[in-house]
């Protein structure tokens, strides 16, 4: 089990966590705090995953924990093994792990309470009213967790443009800390998921952060403005492809850019010819130096035409042709040096 606290970092669109392992009585094991964080977008993905199949597993976990309430004080490795297996299944979903942790924390609280009432629980203890009550508490905890996640999913579905409770009544521990010379208050995530749903939803609703839907994957993402594509790697790749495609289309429609591109394409052909000849570096430098001069003349002329919104005429075409001829003559002179 872990003791977990969270803080909503609105400026960086992250939820930061402080957590450390504890024993079943809540005592901290070791002195090293662990820090982790997830993005606001991660909350969307994790909530969607939990809405699909997680609570079926959590119900199964609850049933197993209810079963272990029937036994005495001895430690049951099978219980810990089962919990470890489910934690491994959801190792990439922090929120699911936190809910499992909350349920497990409640299990140990109920178990210790039973043992304090009756140090020696006999085999027929399953009929004991206290055990029945403890099992109901675990079942109720699962329903509370599910209701909290469903509420968060509803807020997401409505893009947080809905009424959100003005107050929160769930009990929550706090942890005050100083980070980067700032006082921060971390809320506990050990007994209830309500504080997370409440504070996260209120932070979103009171900020200029909105929910948008990615045109590629169809998933929602948080941002201050519609960026069309979310931050997922595959979606950003599609965005880059579209950007390059639009850039090519724009260049095709730019007559001045086309003029320069046509000249550059011609010069690349000449350079490739010299490269294949394996000429000396000094000769290639001569070619590059002359090419820079000619290219600068054409760029400056095209820029003047663009500023004056002057259509391409014979004078500009003749200037380009003149510099193409210069570069051909330079290439020919270098070629003669090797094959003269």
Image (cartoon, helix red, strand yellow):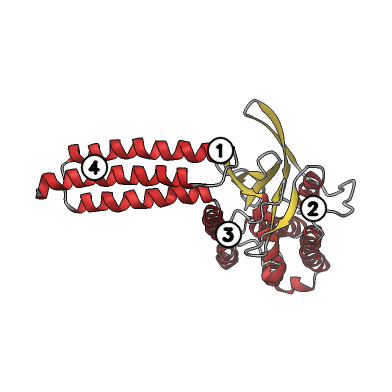
267 and 1: which is toward the camera: 267
Q: Earlier in the sequence, mark 2 or mark 3?
A: 2
Q: Disc 2 vs disc 1: Cβ atoms closer than 8 Å? A: no
The residue carrying mark 1 is 31
In this view of the protein, can residue 246 be seen by the observer?
A: yes
Tell me the tag on residue 194. 2
Label 3 Cα crowd, 10 Å radius (few <14 / some 14-19 / many 20+):
some
* Helix, strand or loop for disc 3: helix
In this view of the protein, can residue 67 be seen by the observer?
A: no
Left or right position of 259 against 179: left
Task: Indicate the quadrant where residue 188 lies.
Answer: top right
Q: Position of residue 290 (x, y in %)?
A: 29, 37
Nearer mark to the viewer, of 2 and 3: 3
The residue carrying mark 4 is 330
Label 2 Cα crowd, 10 Å radius (few <14 / some 14-19 / many 20+):
many
Nearer mark to the viewer, of 4 and 1: 4
Q: Residue at x 64, y 58 (%)?
A: 97
Q: Earlier in the sequence, mark 2 or mark 1?
A: 1
The residue carrying mark 3 is 235
* Farthest residue, direction front: 314
The correct choice, above or below, for 166 with respect to 230 in the image is: above
Q: Disc 1 vs disc 3: Cβ atoms closer than 8 Å? A: no
Q: Position of residue 250 (x, y in %)?
A: 56, 53
Q: Earlier in the sequence, mark 3 or mark 4?
A: 3
Disc 2 versus disc 3: distance between alpha carbons? 32 Å
Left or right position of 102 against 150: left
Label 4 Cα crowd, 10 Å radius (few <14 / some 14-19 / many 20+):
some
Disc 3 versus disc 4: distance between alpha carbons? 47 Å
Q: Position of residue 313 (x, y in %)?
A: 50, 47
């Amino acid at each position: 089990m872990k003791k977990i606290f969270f803080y909503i970092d609105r400026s960086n669109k992250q939820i930061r966590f402080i957590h450390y392992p504890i024993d079943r009585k809540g005592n901290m094991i070791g002195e090293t705090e662990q820090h982790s964080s997830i993005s606001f977008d991660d909350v969307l993905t994790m909530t969607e995953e939990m809405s699909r199949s997680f609570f079926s597993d959590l119900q199964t976990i609850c049933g197993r924990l209810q079963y272990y309430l029937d036994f005495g004080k001895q430690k049951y490795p099978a219980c810990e093994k089962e919990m470890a297996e489910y934690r491994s299944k959801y190792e990439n979903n922090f929120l699911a792990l936190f809910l499992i942790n909350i349920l497990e924390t409640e299990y140990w609280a109920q178990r210790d309470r039973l043992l304090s009432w009756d140090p020696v629980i006999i085999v027929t203890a399953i009929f004991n009213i206290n055990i029945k009550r403890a099992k109901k508490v675990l079942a109720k905890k699962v329903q509370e967790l599910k209701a909290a996640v469903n509420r968060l999913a509803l807020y997401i579905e409505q893009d947080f443009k809905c009424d959100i409770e003005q107050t929160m009544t769930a009990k929550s521990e706090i942890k005050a800390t100083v980070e980067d010379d700032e006082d921060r208050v971390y809320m506990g995530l050990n007994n209830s998921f309500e504080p997370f749903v409440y504070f996260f939803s209120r932070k979103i609703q009171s900020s200029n952060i909105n929910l948008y839907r990615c045109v590629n994957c169809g998933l929602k993402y948080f941002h201050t403005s519609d960026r069309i594509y979310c931050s997922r790697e595959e979606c950003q790749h599609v965005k880059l492809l579209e950007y390059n495609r639009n850039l090519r289309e724009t260049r095709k429609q730019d007559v001045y850019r086309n003029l320069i591109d046509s000249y550059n394409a011609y010069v690349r052909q000449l350079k490739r010819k010299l490269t294949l000849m394996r000429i000396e570096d000094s000769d290639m430098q001569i070619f590059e130096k002359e090419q820079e001069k000619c290219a600068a003349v054409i760029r400056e002329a095209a820029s003047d035409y663009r500023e004056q919104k002057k259509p391409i005429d014979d004078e500009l075409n003749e200037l380009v042709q003149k510099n193409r001829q210069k570069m051909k003559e330079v290439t020919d002179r270098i070629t003669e040096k090797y094959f003269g």
